[in-house]
Image: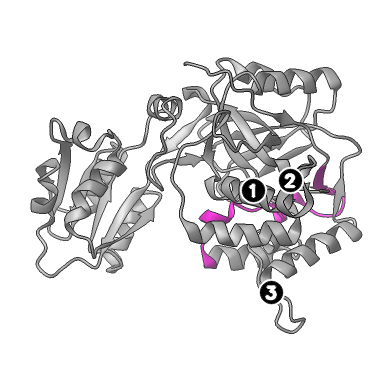
Amino acid sequence: MCQSGAVPRFEPFVGLRYDPTVVHLDQVIAPPYDVIEPPERARLAGRHAANAVHVELPEADLRASLDRYQVAAQLLADWQAEGIVRAEPARAFYPYRMITPEGARSTGVIGALGIDEEGDDVLPHEETMPKPKSDRYDLLAATRANLSPIWGLSLAPGVSDALAPAGPPVIDVLDDDGVRHQLWVQSDPAAIAAISGAVGSAPVVVADGHHRYETARRYRRDVRAAHGDAPGDHDLIMAFVVELSEDQLTVGPIHRALSGLPPRTDLPAVLASTFEVVHAGDSSDRVVSALGESQSLALITAEGAYLLLPRPGAAEAIGSDLDSSLVSAALEALPKATSTHKHSWQEALASLRSGEAEAVLLLRPVTVAQIAGWAEGRRRMPPKTTYFSPKPRTGMVFRILAS
């Protein structure tokens, strides 16, 4: 991979962690906010009064006249006062490993990543949408804390060796999907210097958490405008950094569920401008399962299932070889159609069966090579192109902004 002269800033910080003698960790960790649906939010909130979802996705307290962001700030302060969460005695990095039930591993480290205004050493790889950024800004401003890490991919080959943890973890917990989450605390000066140097040797691509990164960048500008250019914690954001390599990443597709189609829309005909549309059978569970498990690019309607083969020259015509780009280009002929995102083919099929969707498009996962190529070209992929799994848990460590 090519590397620029950029030097990302990556520093240890004084983490705030749940005290395992006070709470059981499996009762208080939560998935990232943007994959939690309302029923899961309610279940997590009911699991424990100090579950991280109470601050990551807070609810207003009308009786106390507190909006949802004020509630999050108050809860975080209360948890510290009550000893539910405690600060580390010194600045540290937090090596973090996730192990799926199938045995796939992703090992990296949580630290404070410098916010890059120029886009040379931290490279966002997807476009973002305005609403989530506004929500996350209000939460950051109220709590003055990074509650969950963004996910960064280091372009430095072999950086995984420098990030590998040693000894037993301080946290070893299973989530509801059976994924094992392990966290270490690394405060040794030599190890800190090695980690900072390894991550700082090449650009970092934002894989997950684009809204939080851009929110932190806006917050940094606002703090500097109000209080001057003195450096502070607002210059960095908590990030989980792993090497951009096949053995560290599981990249899944994000499928499209279509609704609001004009009456009598012939979707195969609409898509034929960009794809060769090949009838693959009926839309039975057996056929859709085969297409989903084989990670095929496909259209599923009530009438049937179709393979979509990009026509020669289609990618060159739109300047992108991504399925998300090709599908978006084809759907420009249906400007009033609504597209929602589904993270599995099963979820996409369920939306079709329930009537929520009139048709679904199964997309193929983006490859690590595509991610690297787009990053090195300083290009951003369309929103909701990549789905990285498993997801780091909110609540493994928090980062408080002292300034």
Q: Earlier in the sequence, mark 3 or mark 2?
A: 3
Q: Using the image as rendered, state which of residue 278 and residue 47 is in the foreground.
A: 278
Asked if residue 316 lies in the magenta stretch, the reply is: no
Residue at image coords 41%, 47%: 384
Quadrant position of residue 260: bottom left
Position of 83 relative to 171 (above/below):
below
Query: Marks 2 and 3: in contact by CB < 8 Å?
Result: no
Please name the residue that numbered disc 1 is placed on: 216
User: Residue 333, image x and y in percent?
Assistant: 16, 56
Relative to residue 49, is residue 199 drawn left or right? left
Q: Earlier in the sequence, mark 2 or mark 1?
A: 1
Please name the residue that numbered disc 2 is placed on: 234
Relative to residue 8, is residue 387 drawn left or right? left
Amino acid type of the residue tagged 1 in the rendering: Ala
User: Residue 7, image x and y in percent?
Assistant: 64, 23
Quadrant position of residue 201: top right
Amino acid type of the residue tagged 2 in the rendering: His
Q: Residues within 10 Å of mark 3 (few under 14, many from 20)?
A: few
Residue at image coords 11%, 51%: 268
User: Residue 144, image x and y in percent?
Assistant: 75, 55
* 3 vs 1, front mark: 1
Quadrant position of residue 293: top left
Q: Residues within 10 Å of mark 2 (few under 14, many from 20)?
A: many
Q: Earlier in the sequence, mark 3 or mark 1?
A: 3
Label 3: which secondary element: loop
Residue at image coords 38%, 53%: 342
Asked if residue 25 lies in the magenta stretch, the reply is: yes
Q: Which residues are magenta?
A: 15-38
Amino acid type of the residue tagged 3 in the rendering: Asp
Please name the residue that numbered disc 3 is placed on: 67
